[in-house]
Amino acid sequence: MKNYLLLFGSALILAACGTNSDVEVSEEASSAAMAASESVPESIPTVSEEIVIAPVEESAPQPDVSREFRNALGSAEDYLNYSSFSKQGLYDQLLYEGFPEDAAQYAIDSVSTDWNQNALQTAIDYLDYSSFSYPGLYDQLVYEGYTAEQAQYALDNVSTDWNQNALQTAIDYLEYSSFSDQGLYDQLIYEGYTAEQAQYAMNNLPQ
């Protein structure tokens, strides 16, 4: 099975900008602007298949908690606001950032997030740049620190074509190595694809 390790770096961007200006607008220009605004629809519907990570709700300040504990929780919330983590993955990331174990554990216990949705988003992220078999993606999520239940939730809810994944995996293999047809078929089976999925890939390879 192939394992991918996502490396996440911390980033906190604070931007505040403001502009004040007084502009005189002629009565004619103002009327034209109002007419144009009335012709624009109030809202333009947008379509997106990608799951949007909901901002993590910031916890209320707790004066009886030490500064480092509060900072660990704030860092955990910042990470979850722009990426998806498993509980174990986020804990390890906080340790990597230099927080002590008790502060990292406090942050994990206190942060408000849906670990099932995090697992699903991680699965979607993996499938956005690579192809996986069903068991291969499950194993990758477990490797990332998700529980068996969380990984299964992701697999049950992710939308993908496993036949096309098998085909793409076969194409990827052929781009950097030579295989006999039987060898490539066996490799796909080793990657966790079913016999039907592997055969679909072999039948649809470009000549």
Image: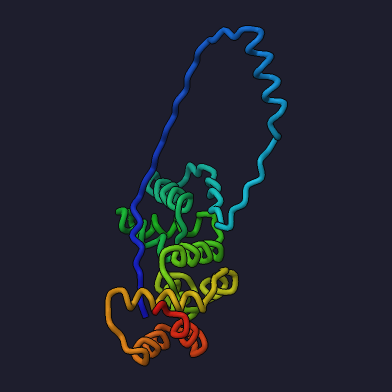
Q: Quadrant of residue 154?
A: bottom right
Q: Is residue 46 left or right of residue 21?
A: right
State the quadrant of the C terminus: bottom left
Tell me: residue 75, above or below residue 199: above
| x, y percent for residue 203 | 47, 85
Residue drawn 54% across and 74% down?
161
Looking at the image, the residue that sits furthest to the bottom is 182
Between 131 and 151, the residue placed more toward the observer is 131
Residue drawn 49% across and 59% down?
109
Between 66 and 114, the residue placed more toward the observer is 114
Between 156 and 176, the residue placed more toward the observer is 176
Q: Quadrant of residue 3?
A: bottom left
| x, y percent for residue 119 | 51, 66
Q: How many marks?
A: 0
| x, y percent for residue 117 | 56, 62
Looking at the image, the residue that sits furthest to the left is 177
Tell me: residue 156, above or below residue 181: above
